[in-house]
Amino acid sequence: MRVPLTICDFLDRAVTVYGARPAVVDEPGTAGSLGTVTYRDLDARARGMALALERMGVGQGERVAIVSPNAARFMISFFGVSGFGRVLVPVNYRLNSDEVQYIIDHSGASVMLVDPEVDEALRSVTAKERILLDGRADEELFGPAPAGRDPAEWEADEDSSVSINYTSGTTARPKGVQLTHRNCWLNATTFGWHTGVTDRDVFLHTLPMFHCNGWGMPYAVTAMGCLQVVQRKVDGEQILGRIADHGVTLMCGAPAVVTAILDAAETRRERGEDVPGRDRVRIVVAGAPPPSRTIERVGSELGWEFIQIYGLTETSPLLTINRSRAEWDDLDGSERARHLSMAGAPAVGVRIRVDEEGEVLARSNHVFEGYWNQPEETARALDGGWFHTGDGGYLTDEDYLVIADRKKDVIITGGENVSSIEVEDCLYQHPAVAEVAVIGVPHDKWGETVKALVVLRPGEAATEAELIEFARGRMAHYKCPTSVEVRPSLVRTATGKLQKFKLRSPYWEGRDRLVSGG
Ligand code: AMP
């Protein structure tokens, strides 16, 4: 027998087995906050959303974009959109209006859902239907389905798309990663298995839901009927408060989230206050390799379990996982942290290989279908039947992967990808700029930060502050250079190519890896 694997399975199970349980605690104090929603209510609201989309004439296969920080409405959309044959387009809410408009147009989204916090900044962005998530304009969309009214049947197809997740990579514009139901199903179950998710877990949404569908963890914890607590902002003290209030056991984030928590915990200890979660919380970290000192502090200062995973939006994302194993039980904290600073061993069903040039390649059922409407880019990424990650690394004797370098021209700052080419394109628009190279340099808080090396046109002048301001007026702020160095020239190869690794190397001297998580 072959039954299609769809993300509907997760909510179906939760509502059948745990219907009366609280499912989601929404962020308090936001417009239209839904308070606490049970699994039965989450299901009714997801069906209500499908009905409302049907009434609006949004057909199966059509795209629905959402631009919002974490919210209960985002959770409803995961199921209310993708669970009924439509495709969710989660958008980074920090992007500017031009960047969001590109994604709306490129994905062909007919509906755009906008959080009030970013509504003003995105005022000029247009879509066929633009709906504000304020609890009034969206009342019909997020209300429960009336009893006895069911949305139209969707002929479940595991190879159809759950979502198109836009990710910055090696092209100036982001590419739309098409994740299928099969990708998301297998990623969620494998991820949930490796991290040991059970129906006793309480999950805190510290990871943005827009980022690879919260890495797929929302599906895994829904299937187990876990309580899920919405966290809108990365605020260390607020996170600690919610961990204490709700008995949180599990969360995910970039290394910058870990740093924010460690800082807040330190302040608490100085004030003689408790730090919650000892021997209870597991924190799953990805996006960049965190320094082993940070990993050690998670154990020694918080008493939490640190788990590292590695993957990309294109791989749903789980490729490798590093969780402390029995063989490491007798190691001291710093030695165990050293082991945990590797990206990890391949997850079940994942094959990893490093090619002659040192690029990490992967094969798995979590690897995406393709880039939306970019067949050439898809063919390049999947060349030879392996997914090309663009990351550089090596495998240890026990097949643990270490990410040591990046082959692609991408900077990862605070867990979000920035395309160097996009930043370069932007700075080239400045009349004084003749040449520019954008590189990632280490940064204590963000892991890496964007630096621009600029050659000015003869007779022209531009200050560092002016160039940074110029970029901030045109791109999402997290993508903008935090420093600009004006140079007389940039060294090129005989064929006129810039060698980024040479430009980067002075800033990374004395480090064993050329990528950093802080
Ligand atoms: P994204 O598609 O935005 O999730 O970014 C994926 C990229 O993040 C990968 O290609 C890596 O460069 C980086 N990355 C993710 N996890 C790790 C990790 N554990 N260690 C090092 N780099 C990572």
Image (spheres, rainbow, N blue to C red):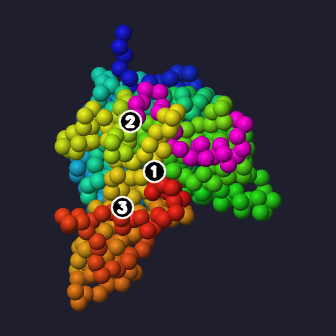
> Which span is picked out in magenta?
329-352
Determine the secondary structure under disc 2.
strand
**Horizontal placement of 212 versus 128: left or right?**
right
Determine the secondary structure under disc 3.
helix
Label ID, residue 404: 1
Q: Name the residue under label 3.
A: 501
Residue found 44% across the figure and 36% down from its top: 319
Q: Residue furthest right?
A: 272
Name the kind of residue labelled 2 in the image: Arg
**Horizontal placement of 449 versus 331: left or right?**
left
Foreground residue among 367 and 397: 397
Q: Earlier in the sequence, mark 2 or mark 1?
A: 2
Say few, some or many: other residues with alpha carbon within 10 Å of mark 2 (under 14 / 14 to 19 / 20 or more): some
Which image quadrant: the N terminus? top left
Foreground residue among 112 and 161: 161
Q: Is residue 225 visible?
A: no
User: Is 275 above or below relative to 497?
Assistant: above
Q: Which of marks 3 and 1 is nearer the N terminus?
A: 1
**Horizontal placement of 446 versus 407: left or right?**
right
Q: CA separation, marks 2 and 3?
A: 23 Å
Q: CA separation, marks 2 and 1?
A: 15 Å
Residue 398, x across and y down, in percent: 52, 33
Foreground residue among 401 and 19: 401
Q: CA separation, marks 3 and 1?
A: 13 Å
Name the kind of residue labelled 3 in the image: Phe
Q: Mark 2 points at which residue?
A: 353
332 is within the stretch colored magenta: yes
Residue 493, x across and y down, in percent: 24, 66
Say few, some or many: other residues with alpha carbon within 10 Å of mark 1 (under 14 / 14 to 19 / 20 or more): some
Residue found 54% across the figure and 31% down from its top: 194
Could you say which quadrant of the image residue 504 lies in? bottom left
Residues at badges 3 and 1 in contact (C-beta under 8 Å)? no
